[in-house]
Every structure is written in C-alpha cells, then in structure tokens.
Image (cartoon, rainbow, N blue to C red):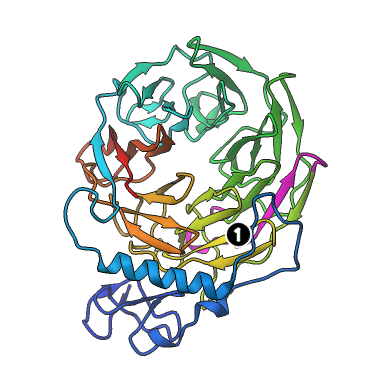
Amino acid sequence: MATCTQHDVETNLSCRTCGTPVCPDCAVRTAMGVSCAAHAGGEKKEAAVALAPKAERSSGGRQRLLIGGVVLALLVGAVILLRPGGGGDSTGGGVWTALPDAGLVPRSDFSSVTTGRSLIVWGGNSPSGPLGDGAIFDTATSEWKPLAAAPIAPRRGHSAVWTGTQMIVFGGLTRGDGCRPNCALNDGAAYDPATDKWTPIPTAPIPGRNGHSGVYFQNRMVVWGGAIEGGGPSADGASYDPATNAWTMLPPAPLAPRVAFRTVATTHRMLVWGGSNGGGQTGKYFDDGAIYSPADNSWSPMAAFPQTNESAGRDTFSSVWTGEKMLVWGGYIRNTTCNPCGREDGAAYDLGSNSWTLMSPSPIAGRGAHRAVWTGREMVVWGGFTTTEVNDGARYNPESDTWVPLSASPLDVRQGPGMVWAGERIVLWGGVAPGARGGNPYFNDGAMLKLGS
C-alpha cells in the first residue's frame, strides 16, 4: 500500500493528475475525484462530458441551458452549505425509525422488491447456508407477515422482480450433491401476496446463474448476464412472459460476458452498463453498455462513458432510472495498489441524447456493495464497503446536480442490505458486515427513512 507524502500514513488514495499518494486529511475532492492540493484547481468537469450523435429523445426528455444549470447548481450548493446544523431533518437528511422484528434469521444475498407500499424479502445466505423463506413488511401498519413456503429450493444470489401483482424469483445458487461448491439454478416461482400463494414457472432456456440482472417491463421479466456454473461470466439472457408462461431467448448482446454490472428498465427498453469479468485484481473492469429493445428484439450500444484521468470501468456500483436518465455511482476496481479501490464518482446517461454527464462530487466516501433507490426526485445511496463497512449515505438531485448527506442511521455498518422505496419512505433491512459482529456477521434488523424537503 502507498504512503501519503505529507503525513506518512498508508493510503489507498492518489491524485488523479500526478498519481501522488494522498491520505484523507490532505486529499481534495474535485469534479474528477481526488487530487493533491497542487492539482485540485486545474481539473475541469466540463472536459469530462462525452457527447454522442443525437438519438431520438425519450418521451420525458427536456433541453436545458448549460449556463442556467450551472447557476442553479451553485445557488443550491450555497444554500446547503449555509444551512445551520442540528438534529432531526434540519439539513434534509431525513428521520429514521427502527423496524420491528421480522421473525427471520439474519441473512445477506437475498432478494427484495417493493409493491409500492410494502417490502418483500426472500431467500438469501446465512451461516447455515442458502435460505428458502421470506416475509413482507407493510409500511402502513408497520407489521411483518411471513410468506407461505415456496415450491423451489432455498437459494442466494437470485433475482426478483415485481410485476404489479406478483413477485417473480429466478435463478441463484443452492447446495447439492451434484455440484461443488454450489449448484447454479435456472428455475423460479411467482408469489402473489394477495393470496399468499406461489406458482412455479418453467425452467429457463439459459444455463443456471447467480448475480445476474432481472427487470420487469413490457409485461415480461428479462434476465441477463451473471455467473454460470463454476463461476464464469455470461453474456446471454432470456425473457419470461407470465401471460403465456413461456420463455424467449434474447439475441446476442454486443457486450463481453460479465458479472456485478447494473441494469435499469425504462418503459420500453433495458439498459445494461459496467461490471467485470470476475477476475479480481487481474480482471477486466468494463465501462461500456448496451440497450435492449423487446419491440424489435435487438441491442444497440450506449455512448462511451466520460473520459477521466483514470479508467471509468467498475463493478458492484449502484444505478437507478429517473424516467429520463440512468444514474450510476460508486463501485470498485481492483489492482495491485488497492483491493478494492472504491470509486467516489458517478455520471448520468441521457437516453434521449445518448450522452453522459459527470455528477458533482459526493459528500460521502467512494464505495461498493451499497444500495440506491429512486424516490421520484432524487437518488438515495446508503451503506456499502470502503475499506470497511459503513452506515452513512447521501441523496442526489439530478436537476440541480447537488448532494445532501443523510442523517445518522440507527443501523450498524453493513453492505448488501435490501433497500426499496415504499410508502413514500425508504425501507432498509438485513445485510452483512464480515468481522464486525463476532461469530455472526449477518443482520436481520432494519429501519425506515422519511425524507424531508
């Protein structure tokens, strides 16, 4: 590990311009990331905006004047800086409320979806292995209810989507005599909370996998990528139509096989970006993406990510869809200098113009394995791992390109919790913090966050 030249302490940070190691005490945050004091003033965010040839605008797209946007960002930023401190929600950080006991064993690597007012969690990993139970939390009554027994094997690393009436679970890993260390699954089931009943779905026409993406749009669940049996990355996918109870293969994607990428669904398309080949410190970290359209069953490439002084490739980051843009933030790379190297930057992809724009610097440290939700106006990120697990977060407004830190959380530090936007509040539950809790690093507690203006 490198040593800060000013304070003679070990650090994973370095100046993006000259490469000089800098510790957190002397690092200067810029629009490009971390810099030493000598180069902090020379980096320009405008130089990192990548524009591609214009494409068809999305239905919600709007043109904005650059000067007006910059002035607004400066004014809002000044207001935030001048606000007085204090408890509660005086800085817009939100008010936390602890959740009641879920009646579930502690876990990580489970699935979570929102019905609009409730959180449903199912499956996951525990000290005893993969789990096959779950529960639903109603934000209106603040009560948990266990789910009926599922007709599929216990699993972890699976995907789950909400159709509007049902949760569909697919894939994941389980234990079995015929595979070591785990069996990759390509089956699933649909759960109806109105009747508390499960219905198995047909086996998919793609190999079993975990860590893949699953999204629901155009009345179908679309799964893509992830790690297949043995852990190798994949680049194939398929869509499942609940109305016909049938699967359809996706055409080949213009992307290399990958894991730990992120996917968002628009009204008509699926956007895939980033990830890695799972090779760790010697692996490949991707900064490309593609768009899948079920209307013509075809893929098209996304514009190149903004060029910075350092590769934009990353995995285990967060991403949300705003209705117009795909926001990505944070994530990891791994190399001989740091394992992992936490990203503290982000960017917004405009589907209408096929272009990226870097976000302003965040007030929280770079990280991966955190979670993010879209509230209808802001992206909220929380938790994750820097050089240790954390329990802080921030809210980002893409209209003003500004961040506000969240108030202090009542939850212990953790990564990989379930996190959804439900009932006009954020609901967090579960996760893991290896080494932080003695013999059992898994959590089964949670909290709700009510955001202010």
Residue plotted at (43% across, 37% down): 420
Residue plotted at (24% across, 49% down): 89
The kind of secondary structure element at disc 1 is strand
- Asked if residue 229 shows in the view, the reply is no
**Main SS of residues in magenta:** loop
**Residue furthest to the right:** 296
Mark 1 crowdedness (10 Å alpha carbons): few <14, some 14-19, many ≥20:
many
Residue plotted at (24% across, 41% down): 411
- Read off the magenta span: 276-297
Position of 385 relative to 347 (above/below): above
Image coordinates of residue 207 in percent, x first then y, are 67, 33
> Which residue occupies the foreground of this view, 56 or 278?
56
Dividing the picture into quadrants, the one containing residue 429 is top left
Q: Is residue 423 magenta?
A: no
Which kind of residue does numbered mark 1 sit on?
Answer: Tyr
Image coordinates of residue 269 in percent, x first then y, are 70, 44
Position of 412 relative to 90 (above/below): above
Image coordinates of residue 14 in percent, x first then y, are 38, 77
Image coordinates of residue 282 in percent, x first then y, are 52, 63
Q: Is residue 291 magenta?
A: yes
Residue plotted at (76% across, 34% down): 249
> Which residue occupies the foreground of this view, 156 or 347?
347
Quadrant placement of the N terminus: bottom left
Position of 313 relative to 379 (above/below): below
Q: Which residue is mark 1?
A: 349
- Label tally: 1
